[in-house]
Image (cartoon, helix red, strand yellow):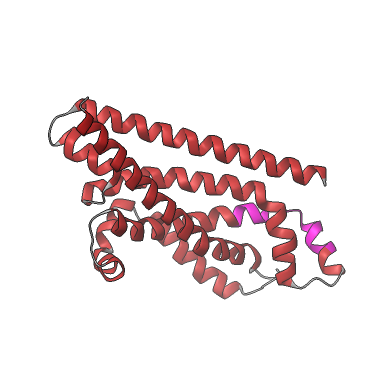
Amino acid sequence: MSPELINLIVQATGETLFMVGIAALLGTVFGLPIGVFLATSRKGELFAAPAVNGVLGVIVNATRSTPFIILVVAIIPFTRLIAGTSIGSTAAIVPLTIAATPFIARLVEAAIREVDAGLIETASSFGASPIQIVFKVLIPEALPGLMLALTLAIVSLLGYSAMVGAVGGGGLGDLGIRYGYQRFMPEMMLAVVVVLIALVQLVQSAGDYLARRVNRRLRQR
């Protein structure tokens, strides 16, 4: 493989890491509070609001059930409004964030619901407010699960980032389509696949390691 093609792979890898990193950060910023609310707003829970919980749950499910490639095309006007363009790695952050937010929200909800209810009751008996229970009990106790949830979200975003290449989203997916498919360069397609596999393996290993470290600290308390 020529140095020019290697440079293209390096550049495309950087674009993929950029859009996945920003989308994961924004998806967590939006998805974490939504997930916490979904986990604590049913009848009789900390922030009891069953009606709002139901409506928000429907919105989250509807967004999650929309195929990503359809979502990318459907929100092109919104992407142009936010990013000023609908192509490139910066524009790809918009659909990636919208796809990541409900996904992370549901994973956060599941992690929060795994926390022992007895801990919540104990904190309430000591006079802790709902906000204090969330930040001092629920999130710290659910941290290993939240780490694994974020790891899964980032791995999924890596796959999504390759799909946005089909609509000019930049990154490794775009490189694989333009060179590997359209120019009939199987070695480029293979290189893209290998890099994506390596990135997924790296993210998964790091996430598993951090989750084990946090879990070990919780058990030693």
In the rendered image, which quarter is residue 38 located in? Answer: bottom right
Work out whether 209 lies above or below 122: above
Which residue is at a point 71% across and 43% down the rendered structure image?
215
Which residue is at a point 12% across and 34% down the rendered structure image?
183
In the rendered image, which quarter is residue 39 located in? Answer: bottom right
Residue 115 is covered by the magenta coloring: yes
Q: Which residue ends up furthest to the front in the rendered image?
A: 3
Q: How many marks?
A: 0
Main secondary structure found in the magenta portion: helix
Instruction: Give the residues in magenta.
Output: 109-122
User: What quarter of the picture does the N terminus occupy?
Assistant: top left
Work out whether 190 lies above or below 196: above
Q: Is residue 71 visible?
A: no
Q: Where is residue 14 in the image (x, y as percent from the top left)?
A: 35, 44
Q: In this view, does 116 lie to the left or right of 113?
A: right
Q: In this view, does 114 lie to the left or right of 147?
A: right
Which residue is at a point 76% across and 46% down the rendered structure image?
218
Q: Is residue 87 visible?
A: yes
Q: Which residue ends up furthest to the right in the rendered image?
A: 126
Q: Which residue ends up furthest to the left in the rendered image?
A: 183
Which residue is at a point 75% across and 60% down the rendered structure image?
137
Q: Where is residue 74 in the image (x, y as percent from the top left)?
A: 26, 62
Q: Position of residue 65 (x, y in %)?
A: 40, 55
Work out whether 218 lies above or below 66: above
Residue 114 is covered by the magenta coloring: yes
Q: Position of residue 213 (x, y in %)?
A: 68, 40
